[in-house]
Amino acid sequence: DGMAAATTEFLARLVEACSAAEAVLADRTQRTERLREVIALLPSVAAIEGIDLTTLEGLAVRAAETGDPRQLSALAVPLERALGRSVRDEDFLPVTDDATRTRDLMPVEIVADSLRSAFNVGGLFRSAECFGAAAIVLTGYSADPNDERVAKAALGTHEAVPWRRAPRAVDAADAARAAERQVVCLETGGSPVAEADLRFPLTFLVGNERHGLDSSIVEGADAFVSVPMHGKKNSLNVVSACAVLLYELRRRWQEQR
């Protein structure tokens, strides 16, 4: 109806005003001008039935004065929620000085077999980049960075981490052995990652979110590891589990070199 349309339009103006302020956050003069526009809009919210954001006016004033991005977020998030917008991981901007850093690599390669979620593949790229994994091999029906959803979730890390495809996980494992790399499977029921005999260079494999890796691959691996669980659930999200293993590998790599 008319009221709903007016509400949506008004909230859209608020979100647009906050976005404009965020874009010039580093410039005190422009930031203050943009946030004054936000402040001017806020009192009118009281006229919209069921929505009262007038308490945000003080936040807008402080954000204008300090330029603290956390205060701007505290101002913007209630507006986004009122508008029914949800912020996804890929909507967050990377830190602007990321590109000035040099990657410190360790001789670790990740094989991701038949991951169903493009978001998980993107998350795997992020973890691989952050911990310094050398490469990712995508097998089975795992999506790759040519898929827009993977590229968005990866937040640009797919451009820093070399990747390639292999038809099957077993092919990737065989190639790793031929290159004299230790082959490790990350799967439930294995040895705790902190206690496992892991050697560099190393290739570790992870499987489908629901079904994991084929048992024949696990049985043929040099090591079979898992992240110990202490809650009711017996497994982690595949990206979280990979991050735990990558952290342990990074710790060992730093110690031995």
Image (cartoon, helix red, strand yellow):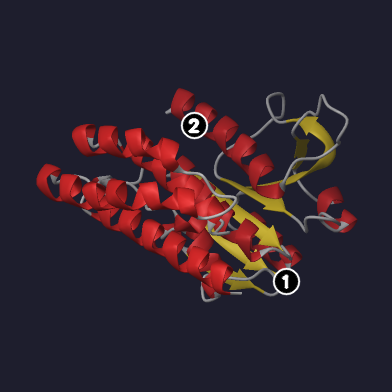
Task: Work out which residue is located at the far left of the displayed protein and give it.
Answer: 29
Q: Which of 31 and 121 is in front in this view?
A: 31
The answer for how far apart the CA atoms under marks 1 and 2 are is 30 Å
Q: Nearer the viewer, residue 125 or 200?
A: 125
Q: Give the label, 1 or 2, closer to the camera.
A: 1
Secondary structure under the numbered disc 1 in the rendered image? loop
Secondary structure under the numbered disc 2 in the rendered image? helix
Q: Which residue is drawn at 20% across and 33% down?
A: 65
Q: Which amino acid does label 2 sit on?
A: Trp
What quarter of the picture does the C terminus occupy?
top left
Which residue has dot 2 on it? 253
Task: Work out which residue is located at the far front of the displayed protein and give it.
Answer: 47
The reply to whether residue 125 is visible in this rendering is no
Looking at the rendered structure, which numbered label has been put on residue 140? 1
Q: Does 76 sit left or right of 41 as displayed? A: right
Query: Residue 187 in the image: x percent, y percent?
Result: 79, 44
The reply to whether residue 56 is visible in this rendering is yes
Q: Residue at x 22, y 52 (%)?
A: 34
Query: Residue 4 in the image: x percent, y percent?
Result: 57, 68
Give the image quarter of residue 150: bottom right
Query: Residue 81 in the image: x percent, y percent?
Result: 55, 51
What quarter of the picture does the N terminus occupy?
bottom right
Q: What residue type is labelled 1?
A: Gly
Q: Which residue is drawn at 51% across and 33% down?
A: 250
How busy is the neighbourhood of tag 2: few (under 14 within 10 Å), some, or many (20 plus)?
some
Residue 236 vs 193, above or below: the answer is: below
Looking at the rendered structure, which numbered label has been put on residue 237? none
Going from N to C along the chain, the mark reached first, 1 or 2, is: 1
Q: Does 168 sit left or right of 81 as displayed? A: right
Query: Residue 167 in the image: x percent, y percent?
Result: 69, 75
Give the image quarter of residue 70: top left
Q: Nearer the viewer, residue 60 or 7?
A: 7
